[in-house]
Image (spheres, rainbow, N blue to C red):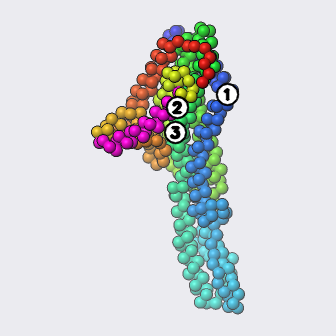
């Protein structure tokens, strides 16, 4: 037990040092900015679409409707009103006063037009409270959908960060220095992995908090339409998506670590990791379309299982490639992802421990 405790303490000490080094580099902060900003694209776009739904002008203010008619003396009268004016079911005094100046025939036509507007336009306006665009910027649906978008870019960001964290040690020659100073190889690489897992989880947390702040701002800007601050779904979906996205990033982190250790290079490691991610999605899609039997094979390939794992009711999915068969169930997807993670982790540690380390080699 003491040996396990000492080993854990050593890993945590090394991890703290890794974080100290990492936070002084520009690349992690640039990648965090990309991770945070990418989901905001959908949120901001949906807000302006919603503003267009309620006002006819994405940059407009209060919804206003109206028409022109003439009074008994032939003067033009412009009647304007908003849907808010009919919330109590009565004709607003300002409109009633203008209508009274009209001849009987014109008054009847005006009342018919007002009735038509209030019934068709304003009732449609009430329907925008349940529009799909609103789900993208009002919590909690905005957070769940934002995390789904973050999973797509998060995989790319995670692989770039992982290969950079490992590859630069080879390029700068600091790996040889660290290992010579009696740091065990297994502990050194384990601290890198723990640091990456912590940074990935922290990045998703920052992304979620940023989405929440933006959601509250946009919800405030459309409060005149009605609706609550957080009435677009179940909060449990946010926690489920956070866990799913966090778990989905792990195998790609280990894939990047493996390629970085295999090639001792940041650039080549990123190219191989990204190449596998994209080529796998394209190849699986083509093969599944050409051969029916390949669909069964796809059920055991990493990408389709990650896509199926990230699927959730009422959440817009943003993934690359096809999904594994949904009837297989979440346990199947979980186990396949775990198998790839463990295999890549074992391969990375084996390669790291068995390979000689040279001095600085550049990249």
Q: Position of residue 230 (x, y in %)?
A: 57, 49
Taking the magenta stretch, the answer to whether it contains residue 115 is: no
| Crowd band around label 3 with a 10 angstrom C-alpha radius: few (<14), some (14–19), many (20+) | many
- Cα separation, mark 3 vs mark 2, equals 20 Å
Residue marked by disc 2? 271
Q: Which mark is residue 151?
A: 3
- Cα separation, mark 2 vs mark 1, equals 21 Å
Of residues 156 and 18, the one drawn nearer to the viewer in this rendering? 156
- Which residue lies at the image location 59% right of the left edge and 32% below the top edge? 202
* Of callouts 3 and 2, the N-terminal one: 3
Stretch in magenta = 269-292
- On screen, residue 22 versus residue 300, left or right, reads right
- Which residue lies at the image location 66% right of the left edge and 63% below the top edge? 60
* Of callouts 3 and 1, the N-terminal one: 1
Q: Which mark is residue 232?
A: none
| Crowd band around label 1 with a 10 angstrom C-alpha radius: few (<14), some (14–19), many (20+) | few
């Amino acid at each position: 037990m003491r040996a396990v405790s000492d080993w854990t303490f050593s890993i945590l000490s090394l991890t703290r040092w890794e974080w100290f080094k990492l936070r002084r580099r520009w690349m992690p902060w640039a990648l965090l900015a990309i991770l945070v900003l990418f989901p905001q694209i959908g949120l901001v776009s949906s807000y302006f679409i919603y503003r267009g739904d309620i006002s006819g002008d994405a940059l407009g203010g209060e919804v206003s409707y109206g028409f022109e008619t003439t009074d008994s003396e032939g003067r033009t009268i412009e009647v304007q009103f908003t849907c808010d004016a009919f919330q109590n079911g009565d004709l607003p005094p300002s409109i009633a006063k203008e209508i009274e100046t009209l001849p009987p025939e014109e008054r009847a036509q005006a009342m018919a037009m007002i009735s038509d507007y209030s019934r068709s336009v304003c009732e449609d306006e009430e329907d925008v409270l349940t529009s799909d665009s609103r789900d993208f910027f009002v919590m909690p649906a905005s957070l769940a959908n934002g995390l789904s978008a973050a999973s797509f870019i998060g995989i790319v960001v995670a692989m770039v960060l992982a290969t950079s964290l490992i590859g630069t040690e080879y390029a700068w020659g600091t790996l040889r220095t660290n290992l010579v100073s009696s740091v065990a190889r297994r502990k050194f690489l384990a601290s890198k992995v723990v640091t990456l897992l912590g940074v990935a989880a922290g990045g998703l947390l920052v992304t979620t908090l940023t989405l929440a702040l933006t959601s509250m701002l946009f919800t405030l800007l459309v409060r005149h339409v009605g609706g609550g601050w957080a009435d677009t779904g179940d909060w449990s979906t946010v926690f489920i998506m956070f866990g799913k996205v966090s778990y989905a990033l792990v195998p790609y982190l280990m894939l990047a670590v493996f390629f970085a250790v295999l090639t001792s290079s940041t650039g080549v490691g990123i190219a191989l990791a990204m190449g596998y991610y994209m080529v796998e999605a394209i190849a699986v899609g083509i093969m599944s379309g050409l051969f029916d039997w390949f669909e069964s094979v796809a059920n055991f390939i990493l990408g389709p299982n990650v896509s199926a794992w990230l699927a959730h009711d009422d959440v817009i999915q943003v993934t690359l490639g096809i999904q594994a068969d949904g009837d297989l169930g979440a346990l199947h997807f979980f186990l396949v992802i775990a198998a790839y993670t463990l295999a890549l982790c074992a391969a990375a540690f084996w390669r790291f421990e068995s390979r000689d380390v040279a001095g600085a080699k550049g990249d």
